[in-house]
Amino acid sequence: MGRSEPETVYFSDEEFAKRVVGDSIFKLWQAVDDLARLRPRRRPRYRVTIFGSARARPGTLAYRHTGQLALALARMGCDIVTGGGPGLMRAANEGALRAGRGQKSSIGIRVDLRAEQKANPFVGTSYEHRTFFSRLQHFVLLSDAFLVVTGGIGTTLEAMMIWQLLQVRKIYNTPLVFVGPQWADLVDWARRHMLRAKPPLADPRDLVIPHCVNTVEEATEIVRRHREKWANNGRRQTPERRRNGKNLPRKDRHTW
């Protein structure tokens, strides 16, 4: 038989001290999970998260297009949410402010990193997290749509997390839009390696969750249609599978 639980635990009793710490952490996670279940029936503002590289420089094609994308969405009435750092995050926040909808329309959710000591100057409302885990959860709680532009390992992590949450229906009917050939190649890779395995490592329906597009206009159109439904229904839709975006005239596209 195991030892009975003492009423008082001293640090010198290492076994019970570790058990108290472990049990307390688990209970804290349960409390966080319960709080995360709470949702307003209707958000007062429609928010779009844009994930993208911190390394892209102003003047590059990806930087210009990300700014154009954020500007178009902000003019549509969307708040823009980013990681609050440099690169394409800065481009998106800058585009949001250019729409003239005020500081609240440009949001940054930062994580404590030595390489990024402060938010970019175009962030109107800033949040800071100590861990990537809580930061990623904050993106999920705050956002009505997710757009993924050019990026590296961090952007890929963010994209995959949203994709997986959509797959298992922890979030649903929330657009996940991959913008540019980089992400279409990733989906093709997943299709080749996951569906051809024996047994398959994914359901074919899982690989059509992301909308893969190549232009600012295509990405904007997908969000526009979803935002219209949000505005008309006053709440998020019931779970459903994705629908393909509508092609736009090629002459009007800003191709990644």
Image: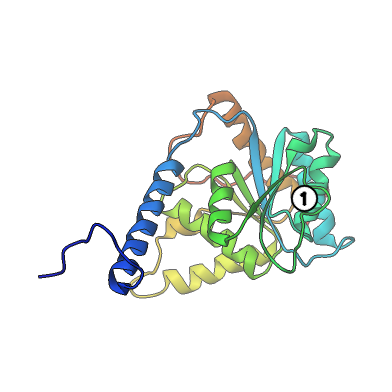
Taking the spot 66% from the left edge, 61% from the top edge, the residue there is: 112
Taking the spot 84% from the left edge, 61% from the top edge, the residue there is: 61
Which of these two is toward me, 188 or 103? 103
Please determine whether, in this image, residue 38 is positioned above or below residue 139: above
Residue tagged by mark 1? 92
Q: Quadrant of the C terminus?
A: bottom right
Please determine whether, in this image, residue 216 is positioned above or below residue 186: above
Position of 67 compared to 4: left or right? Answer: right
Residue type at tag 1: Ala
Position of 30 compared to 149: left or right? Answer: left
Taking the spot 43% from the left edge, 35% from the top edge, the residue there is: 238
Which of these two is toward me, 75 or 115? 115
Whether residue 256 can be seen here: no
Asked which secondary structure carries label 1, the reply is helix
Q: How far from the left and from the top, in percent, is residue 152?
A: 67, 69
Q: How far from the left and from the top, in percent, is residue 122?
A: 82, 48
